[in-house]
Amino acid sequence: MLTIAGSDSGGGAGIQADLKTISALGGYGCSVITAITAQNTQGVSASEVLSPKLVNAQLKAVLDDLGISAIKTGMMGNAAVIQVVAAYLKEHFSGPVVVDPVMVASSGDSLLETAAVNAYLQELIPLATLITPNLPEAAKLLDQPVPDSIITMKQRAGELYELGAKAVLLKGGHLDGDLCTDVLFDGREFHLFEAAKLNSANTHGTGCTLASAIATGLAKGLDLAEAVSHAKHYVTEAIRYSNELNVGSGHGPVNHFYARSAER
């Protein structure tokens, strides 16, 4: 399993969350780092996108040697990095690609240059087996209002599908209510995945974790709906046990290795 994303110095999201997720679910994770961020549980204080040349060199090093069954992409940083990643994957990889169009951190800090949205639309999304935007990201990709109901989510999922990905998982965590409902659309039918909203401030990295868990499921041979269902359960439980970590004084991470806690 390969994750292509930014580094989170606080360990709760990005490359660090991806590798924890892959390991917790029994996969072997390797990485291509696109950007370095200085962040902790209170927010992002600095970030720097790596050069396209270095990103390309990492891609070549990994894909030339390691057997990669699935790829997850997260923070890209700018249009040049998106273009390099898309071009390399188009030429050298034919397996499942899960694209998490990371644009804003949980803290509200921007993680993507505005000009890069077009690169997502034109270069990377058409290569995706699945895209996993949250509601604000969907609104930004479509230049539409943020969905405010399941009905509107289904409409937006259909519009996102028209951008070229094979399937769309629109995450509903921002909706009001007691349930967190995600909508999967594969071009033929909708699947709804529901879980109770848990009262926890420790949800940093949930998007990265979900996308990585889905990609790991696909790498293991699960079909898309099964991979999403398993990943949704994993993230829910990782939030449920997150208070055991007691990390930082702000918006804390989920507990990627919650199964160890559950066994005690």
Image: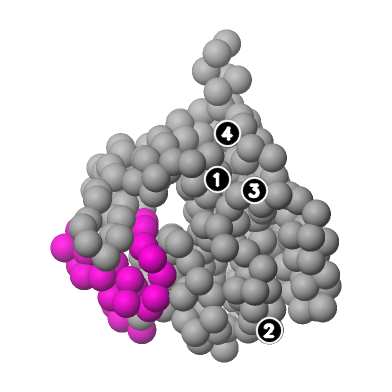
Disc 2 is placed on an element classified as helix
* Spatial separation of the CA atoms under disc 1 and disc 2: 28 Å
Q: CA gap, disc 3 to disc 1?
A: 7 Å
Q: How far from the left and from the top, in percent, is residue 137?
A: 43, 70
In primary-sequence order, the first of circles 4 and 1 is 4
Q: Amino acid at mark 3?
A: Met
Q: Position of residue 213 (x, y in %)?
A: 52, 44
Query: Which residue is at 50% across, 71% downward?
Result: 127
Question: Which secondary structure, mark 1?
Answer: helix
Residue under label 1: 219
| Label 3: how many Cα within 10 Å (few below 14, some 14–19, many 20+) | many
Gap between marks 3 and 2 measured at Cα? 24 Å
Q: Which residues are magenta?
A: 143-172
Count of numbered marks: 4
| Few, some or many residues within 10 Å of mark 2 (<14, 14–19, 20+) | some
The dot on residue 25 is 4
